[in-house]
Image: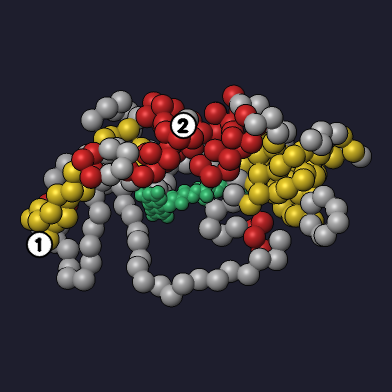
């Protein structure tokens, strides 16, 4: 394990760029395994935005395996035990997820921002060094030497090297570009967009045009249970 300071630049086993759900959970798992981990997260505080808030049953089972289930649930979840398919406003098929999935789990809906805060707190508790408000600016990676990231935090420019740099910086990943990966995309089959709607009954007053579908999920913000 490398753990040394060289020329004002810290060296780690892993530098993870992005402390969203992916980066934070990876950081926690690596730190628990005894690795020295640095997480660089641009946002000082996560914002509420339309993002993934629905854990399918198999994701819930994976969360149990990773040991993060309790903290996710404590972030405030709504339990959705059924997948209901509506056609023309009428429920046509109901799948009981507890009865029909291998783990017997329902779906969970959890505020993304609250999940992120819970998971980054776990990374800190596990011993990862987490820098919030830290923007990664560049990656210098070449064969035969440790990769180096340059980042700004607290008005200072810093560098860190590591055995591995992980780009967990989302779908528009800069790390991916800096590392020279090609992006290969499948043809577009589906478009997904989202809205946060307050109030009950709003969906039932709307009309959905043919060819579209809508996924409605009840969100829990401060409700601890369903
Ligand atoms: C509208 C919508 C609905 C979705 N619904 C679902 C759903 O219901 N269920 C589901 O499972 N998934 C859903 N998803 C997908 C899910 O939200 C994503 O897969 C997931 O959030 C990706 O997490 P991540 O940690 O990989 O990336 P992100 O959440 O994008 O995190 C990347 C992090 O990197 C940070 N970052 C970026 N650049 C830098 C930089 N240069 N320096 C430092 N930090 C940086 C960002 O601040 C951010 O915190 C949805 C996505 C969208 C857009």
Q: Identify the image quadrant of the C terminus.
A: top left
Q: Name the residue: 17% across, 70% down.
A: 210
Disc 2 is placed on an element classified as loop
Which quarter of the image is occupied by the N terminus? Answer: top right
Query: Residue at coordinates 51% horizontally, 42% vertically from top-left?
Result: 21
Residue 60 x %, y %: 37, 39
Q: Is residue 105 left or right of residue 159?
A: left
Q: Which mark is residue 68?
A: 2
Q: Quadrant of residue 211?
A: bottom left
Residue 54 appears in the picture as rendered:
no
Task: Give the side of residue 6 with respect to residue 140, left or right.
Answer: right
Within 10 angstroms of label 2, few (less than 14), some, or many (20 or more) residues? some
> Horizontally, is 32 left or right of 53 in the view?
right
Q: Is residue 197 left or right of residue 119?
A: left
**Residue 41 versus residue 96: which sits nearer the camera?**
96
Q: Nearer the viewer, residue 137 or 143?
A: 143
The extreme bottom residue here reads 187
Residue 51 locus on image (x, y percent): 41, 49
Number of marks in picture: 2
Instruction: Return the residue nearer the eye: 34 or 146.
Output: 34
Label 1 belongs to which residue?
Answer: 88
| In the foreground, 66 or 167 | 66
Q: Quadrant of residue 15?
A: top right
Q: Could you tell me which residue is drawn at 59 percent across and 49 percent down?
A: 168
Identify the element where label 1 is drawn.
Answer: loop
- Residue 89, compared with residue 2, is above or below; it is below
* Residue 74 higher or lower than 160, as above or below: above
Q: Is residue 180 visible?
A: yes
**x then y, percent, for residue 101:** 28, 44
> Which of labels 1 and 2 is toward the front?
2
Disc 1 or 2, which lies upstream in sequence? Answer: 2
Marks 1 and 2 sit apart, C-alpha to C-alpha, by 38 Å
């Amino acid at each position: 394990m490398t753990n040394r300071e060289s020329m004002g630049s810290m060296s780690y086993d892993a530098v993870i760029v992005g402390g969203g759900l992916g980066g934070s959970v990876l950081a926690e798992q690596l730190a628990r395994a005894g690795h020295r981990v640095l997480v660089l997260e641009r946002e000082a505080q996560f914002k509420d935005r339309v993002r993934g808030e629905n854990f399918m049953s198999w994701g819930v089972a994976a969360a149990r395996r990773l040991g993060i289930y309790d903290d996710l649930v404590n972030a405030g979840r709504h339990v959705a035990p059924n997948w209901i398919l509506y056609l023309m406003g009428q429920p046509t098929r109901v799948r009981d997820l507890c009865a029909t999935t291998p783990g017997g789990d329902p779906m969970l809906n959890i505020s993304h921002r609250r999940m992120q805060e819970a998971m980054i707190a776990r990374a800190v508790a596990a011993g990862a060094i987490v820098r919030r408000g830290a923007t990664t600016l560049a990656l210098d990676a070449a064969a035969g030497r440790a990769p180096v990231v340059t980042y700004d935090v607290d008005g200072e420019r810093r560098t860190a090297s590591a055995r591995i740099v992980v780009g967990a910086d989302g779908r528009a990943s800069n790390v991916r570009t800096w590392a020279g990966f090609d992006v290969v995309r499948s043809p577009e089959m589906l478009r997904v967009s989202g809205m946060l709607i307050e109030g009950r009954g709003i969906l039932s007053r709307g009309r959905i045009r043919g060819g579209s579908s809508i996924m409605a999920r009840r969100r829990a913000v401060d409700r601890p249970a369903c």
